[in-house]
Image: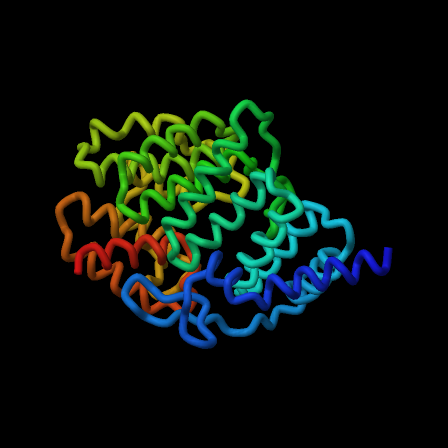
Amino acid sequence: MYLKKLSKIAIISLFSASSAFAQDVLPDVPDGAEAVSLMGETLTMPDATNEGVLDRLADAKYKYMDYPMRLDNAVWYGRRLAYAGDYREAIKIFSEGMFDNPNAPELYRHRGHRYITIREFDRAIADLEKAAEMIKGKQNKVEEDGAPNEFNIPVSTLHGNIYYHLGLAYYLKQDFENAKRVYDLDYGVARNADNHASIAHWRYMIRRRMGETHDEAKHVLDPITADMEILENHTYHKLGLFYKGEISEAEISEGIDLEDSADAATAYGLANWYYYNGDEAKGKEMMEKMLNARAWGSFGYIAAEADLSSMN
């Protein structure tokens, strides 16, 4: 067993050191960078200092070195690396996991997610489309949260997360037709109010960006009600109520800091609302301010960056 473990570690080290392997799964970036923004800016992440994050990462790394490779160990080591801001290393780990688990949609789902983070949308789409093919005819399952909500109840599923991130990748490329198709699939596997809240946000925005009026697009907001039992997607729920006209512009704007990544989802939803309702200058101004946020990995931040890149 000990020799087998050493053999496995040697194999991992060999692939990690191989420039061919690295080039195959990762784009070239400046030294010390995690990614290059769509505006050409070098994106770096500060070292993780949260002891809980680091402790869980160390535990995941230890389990990952076990032999033979378990799918869960590869998934969680990669996830923990990403939570610590080491997105490129996370992508390598998901890729290495595929050697032992070539037919695991989980690895393509998570690698696709992190390709979105580092602005590699075509690679993300390739991974997530492959994952979508792999799950056809397969039973869906709950996906455990890396940062559990206060109720410690996971709200998402494997199938739902594959479609959610695939739809997002298409949206970020402004391929709204495919984004619409995939988020409609995501709606088809939604299991709870939290799923409905997050999916409705994207389904509505996509239709508005495609030129539909509010009256033409509002049917996708039908599942959104004020008394929904939301466990964690409170921001998306509030945005849905705003799009329906049940929350005012003043209410949705109150307390929002455009330069705080914690507010990125609401900030982008509001900026986009101005944009597709005819006030393009205000929408663009808000998006520009969003890019002053320190953390650049949120979906709202990336969406603002993608929109601004297309406008320039």
Figure quadrant of residue 10: bottom right
Residue at horizontal 37 percent and vertical 51 percent from the top:
121
In this rendering, is residue 225 above or below 50?
A: above
Point out residue 168 in the picture as x, y percentages from the top left corner.
38, 44
Viewer-proximal residue among 52 and 84: 84
Identity of the residue furthest to the top in this view = 137
Residue at screen point 72% across, 47% down: 70
From the viewer's perspective, is 204 left or right of 299?
left
Marks counted in the figure total 0
105 vs 4, nearest the viewer: 4
Q: Quadrant of the C terminus?
A: bottom left
Q: Check the image and report above or below for 303 versus 194.
A: below
- Which residue sits furthest bottom? 31
Q: In this view, does 249 lie to the left or right of 30?
A: left
Closer to the camera, 13 or 92? 13
Q: Is residue 277 left or right of residue 144?
A: left
The answer to whether residue 194 is seen in the rendering is no
Task: Name the colouring of the figure.
Answer: rainbow
Q: Where is residue 179 in the image (x, y as percent from the top left)?
A: 33, 37
Is residue 275 among what the camera can see? yes
- Quarter of the image with the N terminus is bottom right
Q: Where is residue 29 in the image (x, y as percent from the top left)?
A: 41, 70
Give the vertical position of 196 relative to 98 (above or below): above
Q: Which residue is drawn at 63% across and 50% down?
A: 97
The answer to which quarter of the image holds residue 38 is bottom left
